[in-house]
Image (cartoon, grey):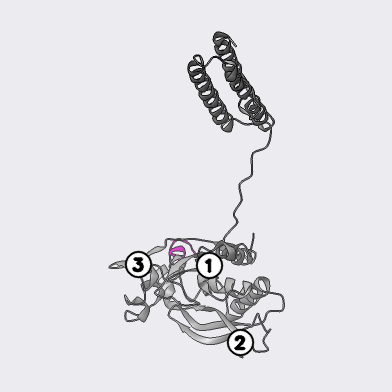
Amino acid sequence: MDPQEFLERIKSLESEALAGFAAASGADALEAARVRFLGSKGLLGEVSKLMAKLDKAARPEAGKALNGCRERVSSAFGAAKARLSTEPEAGDALDVTLPGRRLPAGHTHLITRTSREICSIFEKMGLAVTEGPEVETDYYNFEALNFPKDHPSRDMQQSLFLEEGLLLRTHTSGVQIRTMEKTRPPVWIVVPGKTYRRDDDLTHSPMFNQVEGLVVDRGITMADLKGVLAEFARKFFSESTKIRLRPSFFPFTEPSAEVDIACVSCGGKGCRICKGSGWLEVLGCGMVDPALYDYVGYDANEVSGFAFGIGVDRMAMLKYRLDSIGRFYSGDVRCMRQFPG
């Protein structure tokens, strides 16, 4: 075989292979081109067999040309493969008319949902939702609520003080004073929000959520307070839920009471959760101490009222049967996914 003819054939084959790889528009087409030119029975293999027909003197130059051709064709194949890996297949081309992929949606945290549910129940009874600052002054957090100067909650060991006379509020009751300062009776409000105390165990957290209520109007009695709380318990837990009031003490109410509900687990029969008593403590309440009216300019002879405070975290634990307050703040989404909403 004429050496020149062999070289021309290699050159023509190389041009055809480079064009074939460049024109390949998909993985299948590229693979077909590879088999045709570089496969074990491909055209380059067929041309290499023609080396045996060349004179021995011409074989070194022909072999060098053949190796160069094979190297360039292989490089072209590699480049085409890389190109196609970054381009969509014809059938996978972007269709801009298709709707976008919907991102997974979260849902309201159980504490937020519970707080809103509590507020909604009281709103239906005529109480308006009111909010206030989480950083509170000693005056609104303690003084105007009739706390004695030596009350334990005013100690650094009990409350989270930021500086002298300024602290993270220990309850939302300060908003009640702020509201009465700006509003003449009647006052019907419910106050949700975060509160802070030095507590940390299975049922307490340094940060927790409260909903407090205040009603000040003419002729308000303890019977009104019990009626409102009984209705709340029925709406929040179940229509069959019973409550009881036990005497207690709070600086800002007189008389004061702790409110228990019939155990949500055993219905009042006695179990491990209620420690056999059949009752669970859920909130504190009482009639507004007339001493508070002096701070806001109300006449205790004209008006009376009641107040109550509900721990949202505890109510959520009871309603949804959670064993630790830490579940709400652990960051483990598996817990919250149990309660979509």
Percent of width and height locating residue 218: 56, 72
- Which disc, if any, is residue 154? none
Label 3 neighbourhood size at 10 Å, few (<14), some (14-19), many (20+)?
Answer: many
Residue that carries the numbered disc 1 in the rendered image = 328
- Mark 1 lies on a secondary structure that is helix
Q: Is residue 178 left or right of residue 148?
A: right
Q: Quadrant of residue 128?
A: bottom right
Q: Which mark is residue 167?
A: 3
- The three-letter amino acid code for the residue at tag 3 is Leu
Q: Which residues are magenta?
A: 178-187
In the image, what residue occupies the spot 62% across and 64% down? 117
Screen quadrant of the C terminus = bottom right
Choose between 142 and 32: the one closer to the eye.
32
User: Which residue is under mark 2?
Assistant: 272
- Image height of 260 relative to 97, above or below: below
Q: CA distance from mark 1 to mark 2?
A: 22 Å
